[in-house]
Amino acid sequence: MEETVGTQLEHPKWFAAVAPDRPAVIAGDVTVTYAQLEARSNRLAHALRAAGLGVGANIAVLMENRAEYFEITWAGLRAGLLVTPINWHLSGAEARYIVEDCGADALIASASCADVVAELAGAGPKIRLSVGGPIEGFEPYEQVAAGYPSTPIDDEADGAWMFYSSGTTGRPKGIKPPEVGGPLGTPMGFTAMVRFLFGGDENTRYLSPAPLYHAAPSGWTNAMHRIGATVVLTERFEPVDFLETIERHRVTMAQVVPTHLVRLLKLPEQERARHDLSSLKTLVHAAAPCPVDVKRAVLEWLGPIVYEYYAGSEGVGFCFIGPEEWLAHPGSVGRSMQGKVHIVDEAGEELPAGADGRVFFEAARRFEYHGDAEKTASVFDDRGWATYGEIGHVDADGYLYLTDRATNMIVSGGVNIYPRELEDVLVRHPRVADVVVIGVPDAEMGESVRAVVQPASPPADPAALETELIAYAREHLARFKAPRSVRFLDEFPRLPTGKVARRLLPPDVLA
């Protein structure tokens, strides 16, 4: 690829040249500078080319949050490859399905995932590299990469992510981008939004506490490196550690999900107050709608620095709302920044402002689910509008409010009940760590409302806590929306996004 001399690229290689000693990644005790990120990703890019991976080939990455993740993904993304992160919590069979379905030409896994990749014996790609220790049948990543030069490959090109959907109703599907292999460092709409909507720049210190196999953490940390920021990475989200990390590294921007906000608010006020959070200028949340009372409490605590967006891995719609806007439109996920929002009924007819219906966007781009034309078609209507499957409405000012996912709706006695409304109430109860609301068969009502609760601590008397939670719900909602039963689980099965996998709830809570 030919570069114009003096033209800044949206790429970490630019910052390796102009700010080589700036930290690109801080992960615990490990710091990787932009110069080191450039050299190490170049070495692996050479190794992948030498192994026959050309533009459009695929590498699968299976590892926990660690600094090497960025060296590996940037190697693929600068070599014009498709990069597929895999959830390390998956079973061996589930991981094998993704590796085979995406057609991975290479698999790079950490030693901590050795048990998962053992399922791939006799299958999957021939190119297998291990990070952080040995895996049977894998070559050491560091040793292989060391044999190649730290200078760029001759045919650099922009790669792309190929994320896999959460698989709420079946096996996950790869979200194949419309194109791959363009000029390296071409300006992107997403990095422009990071800059102009959220205030990201070269001086940003961005804290990412979520697992990197999910689209948002990978996409946002990638964008941070494209604009020269520093990514501060933690292995997982823990409320006190999150606050300590902000203070220790003078973090200026962080991203969380609403569950994280709930957990932060449940910390004792004295614990929250003892940390110096003055460096934090932007707190972003996404992935699920945030209960109004929770967000209002966070704004009162941290001030007007809380920003929200609504989007999906498919990239067919993007809404944004800042703190002042949200205070004027509480509960909204914002206005569309990509294409007009349409609310339609079951027949596809548009509904007026304030009426709930299916949410569609005038999609800015097309995509396809890898190997599933039927599922791809289900996202788009005959006008080319696309949906994430949500129910919601817009107000007179064009602000979008989400009610729930269409597939989650409970019909009890002919009345539509949206689980999210009840979930938003119950999650605020001090004895509830997390909750999902489902419909269960009912001979009289068709379905009845059941709350499945992950308690903050094991209840000494589950029946008493069930009665307490039902009464609590009735205090805050209409009686018909309250649960008629409550079941308790020590831990929820979860999707790669961190959301509860409803389809994997134990049979005894579904009956």
Image: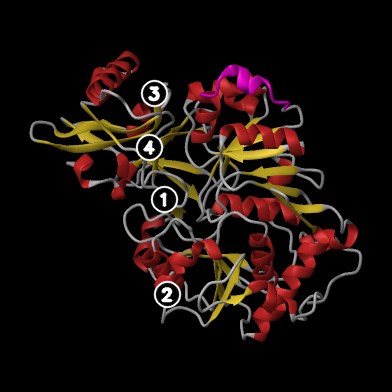
Question: Which badge, 2 or 4, comes first in the chain's sequence?
Answer: 2
Who's the residue at 43% across and 50% down the image? 387
Position in image of residue 405 (x %, y %): 37, 41
Residue occupying the point 55% across, 50% down: 211
The residues colored magenta run 266-276
Q: Which mark is residue 413?
A: none
Number of the label disc, if any, that sits on residue 431: 3
Amino acid type at mark 4: Asp
Report if residue 271 lies within the magenta region. yes
Q: CA distance from mark 2 to mark 4?
A: 38 Å
Between circles 1 and 2, the one closer to the viewer is 2
Q: Nearer the viewer, residue 253 or 431?
A: 431
Cα–Cα gap, marks 2 and 3: 42 Å
The residue that mark 2 highlights is 120
Residue 49 vs 296, above or below: the answer is below
Question: Which residue does the numbered mark 1 point to in the structure image?
Answer: 495
Q: Secondary structure at mark 1?
A: loop
Q: Picture coordinates of residue 105 (x, y %)?
A: 53, 79
Q: N-terminal of the two: label 3 or label 4?
A: 4
Q: Earlier in the sequence, mark 1 or mark 3?
A: 3
Which quarter of the figure is the C terminus placed in?
Answer: top left
Q: Which quarter of the picture shows residue 467?
A: top left
Is 490 above or below relative to 225? above
Instruction: Kindly report which numbered mark, 2 or 4, lies closer to the viewer in this rendering.
Output: 2
Asked whether the beta carbons under mark 2 and mark 4 sit within 8 Å of each other, the answer is no
Pointer 4: residues within 10 angstroms few (<14), some, or many (20+)? many
- Disc 1 or 2, which lies upstream in sequence? 2
Q: Quadrant of the N terminus?
A: bottom right
Q: Which residue is mark 4?
A: 404
Residues at marks 3 and 4 touching, judged by CB atoms closer than 8 Å: no
Question: Is 425 part of what is drawn in magenta?
Answer: no
